[in-house]
Amino acid sequence: MYDADTSSIITSGGIASWAWAEFLLRLNEFAEDVVIVSYNYDLFLERALTALGIPYSYGGLGVIDRTSSKIRIYKPHGSINFVGRNDVALTPAERPPREIDYRLAEDLNSRREVRVESENLNDYWLRYAVIPPAGESSKLSQSWNRTLHEDLLKEAKAMRPSDLVVACGISYWHVDRTELDAIIAQLDPEIRAYMINPAPSAEFDSVLSSLFQHYTCFSSGAPLLKVKL
């Protein structure tokens, strides 16, 4: 339901005046390489990129591909279109009651890999590669999550001082904090760092301002349009 609602907003031209849409277009045109990290499960970002005519690929689900598209999306906590590589959608008669069975989540361990299934989101899959927001996600041992996080750390370490990092909508809550700290620790302290948040986390703001020499916090995405890429 939520995916259908966001899709209708995007296809109706609801992002035409969105500052982030213009920023994404600028990135696609002028940036050499773009890595986007999203802890959301929904496909709003992917729908927006498609509507803007911007190609993208998913990082961390195999070999890092820098040839098919400039933009790579990493989703460390999974996505509604990540399913078990060999799983098959269930028929209505096969569907169990809609309740969380944590044994199924445990089954997405080292024996299982993930594939992207974006076309039939209303199908019912027995297992989704989604990590619920409980405890510290770094304690989980799913192979797809561990591999994705390791690839993401490599991406962060490869960034140069002249590159740009933008953090948006991050609460810096304890669920994500360990993962975020691991990524931030790989970045060069000379990198240009920005946070976009009208009510930023005081803790996260302190971390960024103490680690990066060129750090700025904006209340909206509009100032990014003036940032040199």
Image (spheres, rainbow, N blue to C red):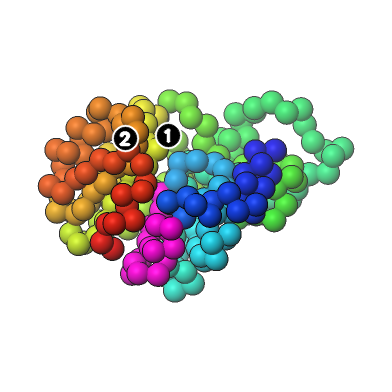
Contact check, label 2 and label 1, Cβ < 8 Å: yes
The structure residue drawn at horizontal position 36% and vertical position 28%, both measured from the top left corner, is 173
| Residue 56 on the magenta span | no
Q: Is residue 94 left or right of residue 42?
A: right
Residue 5 visible in the displayed image: yes
Q: Nearer the viewer, residue 17 or 162?
A: 17
Residue, far front: 17
Residue, far bottom: 67
Residue type at tag 1: Ser
What SS does tag 1 mark? helix
Span highlighted in magenta in the image: 22-37
The percent coordinates of residue 134 (x first, y second) are 47, 26
User: In the rendered view of the protein, which quadrant contains the C terminus?
Assistant: bottom left
Residue position marked by numbered label 1 in the rendering: 137
The structure residue drawn at horizontal position 43% and vertical position 25%, both measured from the top left corner, is 135
Residue type at tag 2: Thr
Q: Nearer the viewer, residue 146 or 209?
A: 209
The percent coordinates of residue 101 (x first, y second) are 64, 28
| Residue 34 on the magenta span | yes
Q: Is residue 162 left or right of residue 132?
A: left
Q: Is residue 25 left or right of residue 15?
A: left
Q: Which mark is residue 178?
A: 2
